[in-house]
Amino acid sequence: MQARTLNKFLNKVVDGVNDGILAFQENGEITVFNEVLERMLGISASYAKGKKLSQVFKNIELTRFLHSE
């Protein structure tokens, strides 16, 4: 399967799940933000994707939690 076809397939799977899904890179950049999460949080995926967690979730101390071990 080509990368583009696989990416489209995976996006459909993620958007078809009945749970909010958020994925991000180690540097905090949001890469996946599905439709359910959009409805849960009232934040659009187009706004969130590509931004850092700290830019989208300003009132949540996610960065401190993510860097604790």
Image (tube, helix red, strand yellow):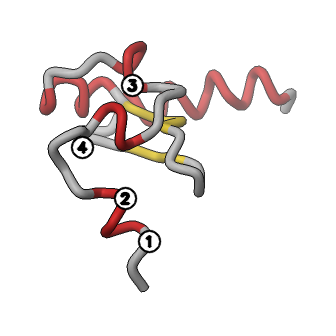
Q: Determine the CA span between mark 1 and mark 2.
A: 6 Å
Residue 25: horizontal and vertical position, in percent?
Answer: 58, 49
User: Mark 2 highlights which residue?
Assistant: 63
Amino acid on which the number 3 mark rests in the picture = Ala
Amino acid on which the number 2 mark rests in the picture = Thr
For the point 61% across and 28% down, the residue is 9
For the point 42% across and 85% down, the residue is 69
Of the two numbered discs 3 and 1 in the rendering, the one whose residue sits closer to the viewer: 1
Q: Determine the CA span between mark 4 and mark 3.
A: 17 Å
Residue 61: horizontal and vertical position, in percent?
Answer: 23, 57
Amino acid on which the number 4 mark rests in the picture = Asp
Indicate which disc, 4 or 2, sits on the residue closer to the N terminus: 4
Quadrant including the N terminus: top right
Residue 48 is labelled as: 3
**Image position of 2 (left or right of 17):** right
For the point 23% across and 39% down, the residue is 58
Q: Determine the CA span between mark 3 and mark 2.
A: 16 Å
Q: Which residue is at the front of the view, 51 or 41?
A: 51
User: Mark 1 highlights which residue?
Assistant: 67
Q: Determine the CA span between mark 4 and mark 1.
A: 25 Å
Secondary element at tag 3: helix
Q: Which residue is at the front of the view, 9 or 68?
A: 68
Secondary element at tag 4: loop
Looking at the picture, does residue 35 appear above or below residue 21?
A: above
User: Mark 4 highlights which residue?
Assistant: 19
Indicate which disc, 4 or 1, sits on the residue closer to the N terminus: 4
